[in-house]
Image (cartoon, rainbow, N blue to C red):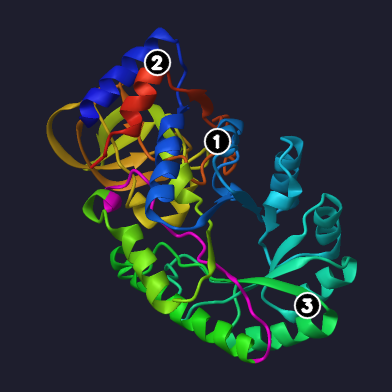
């Protein structure tokens, strides 16, 4: 099936005289992902804007998500310019300076996430009526070898923050946490259960002190909607729902913050093979797309591009190759040890599921431009949205 997708996409790209590298936008994949989330997870949906800020993506989610969350003023401005009601926007970066906080408040945002005394005091001093979410750092946070977990407080710290909020007259509307995608036992939803148990203890202690918090935000951390993960584990969201009911049996409002789940399948990168060669005994496949120009996630976040799929039309038995970008430095590596057949110079290849943290995480380097974004026609849009890429 993957080979058929590449063949049809290549024929269409040639008819359209598209110049690679190009990101192919698949609106249907976003629509389908949102429908699945609505069906299987009983929660309000807050789109994590940082995952993909392209206008086509913002248009695709505009009328079907409940709210949005942003981490910076630039993304907030995009939503405001698109006439999104600021009451539907939460500012969730707890590390904020006064100028940024003032700009967000002046834009009409009234909802903020905090995890320390400094942030709470700074925001509460700007105006009354703001609503706050206290963010917990779970004891098992899914930290990857390449990341440093920077956000979230301990249960004890959240208790003190809640007390300070009471002294300041600030409204605590929710408790939240975030589970990283590198968490073990993700398929069973176990990391969510552990975090929910910790959050439930905080909620109970606050209630004992007279503060009832009616909303729980479980964050995101869901694998992309078209990853094989969801085909292999179709009950993933059912398990998360089960954990919610078990840990929080009393009525509670639940919010989730999907970013990668919605954004990842929204784009696929079409690139051209510069050459597939052997140098010093090593097979090297050079592409015209760079890790610096749209593949930040696979090049720098996921070591070796582990989850990146590569669809080729080459013939013969697959063999290991290093998939490289065109920049002449040793770090422009798109995927290590990719097993693909030999490919001809000038052939096109498809890198599906590259919509998360790609557009917006790009840079022109040594004359290599970021991929432009082109929407797929309806028939290819549907085909891409229903394909599971191995």
Disc with the residue nearer the chain's start (1 vs 2):
2
In space, the residues marked 3 and 2 are separated at their CA atoms by 52 Å
The spot of residue 305 in percent (x, y) is: 36, 50
**How many neighbours does mark 3 have within 10 angstroms: few (below 14), some (14-19), or many (20 or more)?**
some
Residue at the image point whose x is 48% and y is 37% from the top? 327
The residue at the point 39 percent across, 49 percent down is: 39
Does residue 75 appear to the left or right of 186 in the view shown?
right
Q: Element type at marker 1?
A: helix
**In which quarter of the view is residue 235 placed?**
bottom left
Check residue 227 for magenta coloring.
yes
Q: CA distance from mark 1 to mark 2?
A: 21 Å
**Within 10 angstroms of label 1, few (less than 14), some, or many (20 or more) residues?**
many
Between 188 and 12, the one nearer to me in the picture = 188
In this view, 104 is above or below 116: above
Stretch in magenta = 209-230
Q: Position of residue 70 (x, y in %)?
A: 66, 53
The residue pinned by badge 2 equals: 13
Nearer to us of marks 3 and 2 is: 3
Residue tagged by mark 3? 118
Q: Is residue 314 left or right of residue 70?
A: left
Instruction: Tell me where residue 251 appears, x and y as whole percent.
Output: 51, 71
Mark 3 in CB contact with mark 1 (< 8 angstroms): no
């Amino acid at each position: 099936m993957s080979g058929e997708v590449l063949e049809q996409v290549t024929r269409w790209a040639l008819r359209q005289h598209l110049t690679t590298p190009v990101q192919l936008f698949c609106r249907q994949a976003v629509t389908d992902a949102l429908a699945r989330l609505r069906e299987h997870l009983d929660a309000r949906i807050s789109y994590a804007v940082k995952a993909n800020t392209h206008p086509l993506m913002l248009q695709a989610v505009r009328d079907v998500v409940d709210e949005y969350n942003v981490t910076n003023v630039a993304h907030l401005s995009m939503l405001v310019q698109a006439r999104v009601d600021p009451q539907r926007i939460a500012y969730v970066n707890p590390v904020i300076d006064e100028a940024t906080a003032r700009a967000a408040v002046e834009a009409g945002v009234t909802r903020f996430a905090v995890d320390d005394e400094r942030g709470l005091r700074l925001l509460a001093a700007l105006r009354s009526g703001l609503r706050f979410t206290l963010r917990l750092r779970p004891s098992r946070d899914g930290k990857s070898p390449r990341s440093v977990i920077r956000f979230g407080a301990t249960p004890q710290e959240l208790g003190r923050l809640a007390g300070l909020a009471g002294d300041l007259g600030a409204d605590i509307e929710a408790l939240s946490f975030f589970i990283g995608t590198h968490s073990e036992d993700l398929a069973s939803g176990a990391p969510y259960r552990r975090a929910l148990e910790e959050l439930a203890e905080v909620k109970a202690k606050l209630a004992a002190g007279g503060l009832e918090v009616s909303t729980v935000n479980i964050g995101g951390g869901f694998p992309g909607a078209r990853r094989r993960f969801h085909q292999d584990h179709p009950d993933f969201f059912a398990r998360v729902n089960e954990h919610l009911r078990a840990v929080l049996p009393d009525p509670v409002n639940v919010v989730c913050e999907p970013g990668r789940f919605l954004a990842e399948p929204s784009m696929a990168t079409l690139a051209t093979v510069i050459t597939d060669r052997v140098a010093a005994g090593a097979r090297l496949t050079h592409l015209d797309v760079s890790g610096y120009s749209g593949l930040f996630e696979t090049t720098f976040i996921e070591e070796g591009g582990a989850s990146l799929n590569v669809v080729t039309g080459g013939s013969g038995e697959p063999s290991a190759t290093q998939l490289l970008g065109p920049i002449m430095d040793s770090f422009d590596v798109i995927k290590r040890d990719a097993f693909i057949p030999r490919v001809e110079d000038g052939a096109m290849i498809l890198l599906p599921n590259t919509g998360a943290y790609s557009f917006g995480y790009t840079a022109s380097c040594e004359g290599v431009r970021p991929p432009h974004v082109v929407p797929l026609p309806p028939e290819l849009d549907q085909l891409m949205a229903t394909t599971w890429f191995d």
